[in-house]
Image (tube, rainbow, N blue to C red):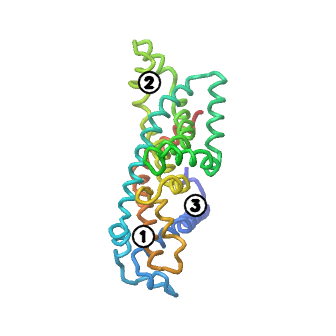
Amino acid sequence: MNDRLPVWLRTLNSLGLTTWLVIAAFPFAWMFLISFRSPVDAFSVPPKLFAPMTLHNFYTIWFEDHFWRYALNSGVVTLVTVAVSLAIACPAGYALSRYSGRLGFWLLVSALIFRAMPHIVLLTAYRPAFFEMGIWSRYETLIIVLVAINQPFTIWMMRSFFANIPKELDEAALMDGCTRFQAFRLVIMPVMGPGLVTAGLFAFLLAYNDFLISSQLMNGEMATMTAALGNYMGQSKHLDKLMLGIAGAVSVVIPIIVLIVLFQKQIVAGMTQGAVKG
């Protein structure tokens, strides 16, 4: 179909996409570049494009400032949040996709309203309660809150994916002697691979990238990477500290890029599958 377009239109299209890509990628590319520089070379005027490269910033923040602890915290919180979110969203999304009553619609609307609320509004309610109960700055506390906040979005996504699977598959499984749960587990879930990956990745990003909730509920050595980065930002008067923050920011972004590159086909297939129906 692209070959039928005039040459000038294809050229304009390619030029526009290339320009957008350069503008979108420039901030991260520049941050990645200067993270391997000394403060003097990183902020020199004019910029020194071929200044010596060094791993000093990464070594200092990861081993001397113990950034690996924050990475461990982020890994535990994010992976458990994704596992719990999917464990709840799969049966909930399946049930809502097969339920035709008005109650299902209002449950989805209520979930969407809860998800749309500013997180700072919710913090005023449960943060004092966590202090009183003595469960502040613990893995399980942050995981419960992140699951509660992000679950409505995950259920919406899974419901859209399940709605695109013909109900005839369920009926055929039931006729073959399966229970409803067996039909869900043995027939429906095996074809939900792309949708599961897509919903899991979005749940991962929502939990991994969270700053507000993590910074308010975790402190000290229990902080996540995004919350810990706040200690390095705004240090314009201390360039060494700022350079460590830039190295930490690059460290936070790299896992996201790797995940998207690894699962790009499943993500596109899942998003297409969920967009057809729902």
**Cα distance between the residues tagged 2 and 3:** 46 Å
Q: Earlier in the sequence, mark 3 or mark 1?
A: 3
| Residue 251, horizontal then vertical, whole percent | 41, 64
Which residue has dot 2 on it? 184
Residue 30 in view in this figure: yes
**Cα distance between the residues tagged 3 and 1:** 39 Å
Can you say whether 275 is above or below 262 in the image? above
Q: Report the front residue among 17 and 29.
A: 29
Circle on res. 107: none
Can you say whether 107 is above or below 212 in the image? above
Rendered-image quadrant of the C terminus: top right
Can you say whether 94 is above or below 53 in the image? above
Circle on res. 10: 3
Q: Earlier in the sequence, mark 1 or mark 2?
A: 2
**In the visual, does 179 lie left or right of 160?**
left
The amino acid type, in three-letter code, at marker 3 is Arg
**Cα distance between the residues tagged 1 and 2:** 45 Å
SS type, badge 3: helix
Q: Residue at x 51, y 49 (%)?
A: 206
**In the visual, does 144 lie left or right of 259?**
right
Query: In this view, which residue lies farthest toward the bottom?
Result: 45
Q: Earlier in the sequence, mark 2 or mark 3?
A: 3
Q: Which of label 3 and label 1 is nearer to you?
A: 1
| Residue 30, horizontal then vertical, whole percent | 48, 73
Mark 2 nearby-residue class (10 Å; few <14, some 14–19, many ≥20)? some
Which residue has dot 1 on it? 247
SS type, badge 2: helix
